Image: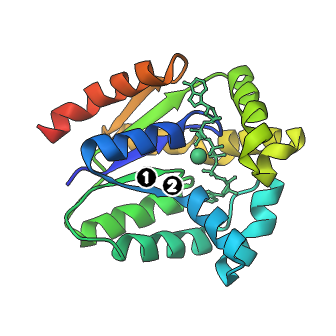
Amino acid sequence: MINLILFGPPGAGKGTQAVKLAEHFGLRHLSTGDIFRREMAEGTELGKAAKAFIEAGKLVPDDITIGMLKNNMVAHQPGTGFILDGFPRTIPQAEALDRLLSTLGASVSLVISLEVNDEELVNRLRGRALTSGRTDDADENVIRKRLEVYKNETLPLKDYYRKKGVLEDVNGMGTIEQIFSDICSRIRPLAG
Ligand code: AP5
Ligand code: MG
């Protein structure tokens, strides 16, 4: 069972690549951001709890996020691996994921960290704001806040995965197809 994490700042291309990789390798794509947005649109309790944090560009608290991810993972057909996009974002989330996967007899196979500079990130998110309808893209201050939160709260996770020997940095600048092909070449040995 291959379990991948797509790691990187807002706008790095996690969602874009995750959709393609999930199809190519037959993995189940789980995006915590997409799930929160769906719950917000449906006006569920979970959506209401997450809304203020997302609109401010802050992380949703760990207990809410971990509970939500657990529910989504166990509701899943056993045996197929996952591609996680936007999770984990804190050390407690990473530890919870390790425990959860170990109950399935599995572990994190590979963490792909998409490396993109800030200028390109802001340009991409400004571009996406025109069509995404995402409230956290509409305001430049919220975009900056998300980048700051990434650096302060999420970036330290790279060390956590580097120590486990599963981290690979990938150049996230270039065409979507070039980056996809680079990531595929790193996953293929695991699938073999
Ligand atoms: P989330 O939905 O995960 O957003 P994010 O991390 O801010 O990342 P984005 O979705 O904005 O970017 P992406 O890396 O997916 O890039 P994309 O492929 O879209 O989280 C949103 C919020 O939910 C968080 O702020 C937080 O509040 C909450 N949340 C979610 N998970 C959480 C967690 N685990 N814990 C706590 N809170 C959590 O690409 C971006 C744009 O660039 C697109 O327009 C795309 O078309 C374009 N693009 C992609 N690749 C390229 C390329 N190679 N060249 C040019 N353009 C490209
Ligand atoms: Mg995304």
Task: Compare residues 44 and 140 and report the one nearer the observer.
Answer: 44
Q: CA distance from mark 2 to mark 1?
A: 6 Å
The residue drawn where x is 77% and y is 63% is: 53
Cβ atoms under marks 2 and 1 closer than 8 Å: yes
* Mark 1 neighbour class, 10 Å CA radius: few under 14, some 14 to 19, many 20 or more: many
Task: Compare residues 100 and 18 and report the one nearer the observer.
Answer: 18
Q: Which mark is residue 31?
A: none
Asked whether mark 2 and ligand 1 are closer than 8 Å, the reply comes as: yes
Q: Is residue 98 above or below residue 192?
A: below
The image shows residue 54 at horizontal and vertical percentages of: 75, 59
Residue linked to disc 1: 84
State left or right for residue 144 relative to residue 159.
right
The three-letter code of the residue at mark 2 reads: Phe
- Answer with the quadrant where ligand 1 appears in the image: top right
The residue drawn where x is 11% and y is 37% is: 192
The three-letter code of the residue at mark 1 reads: Leu
Specify the quadrant of the image occupied by residue 78: bottom left
Residue linked to disc 2: 87
Q: Is residue 79 above or below residue 161?
A: below
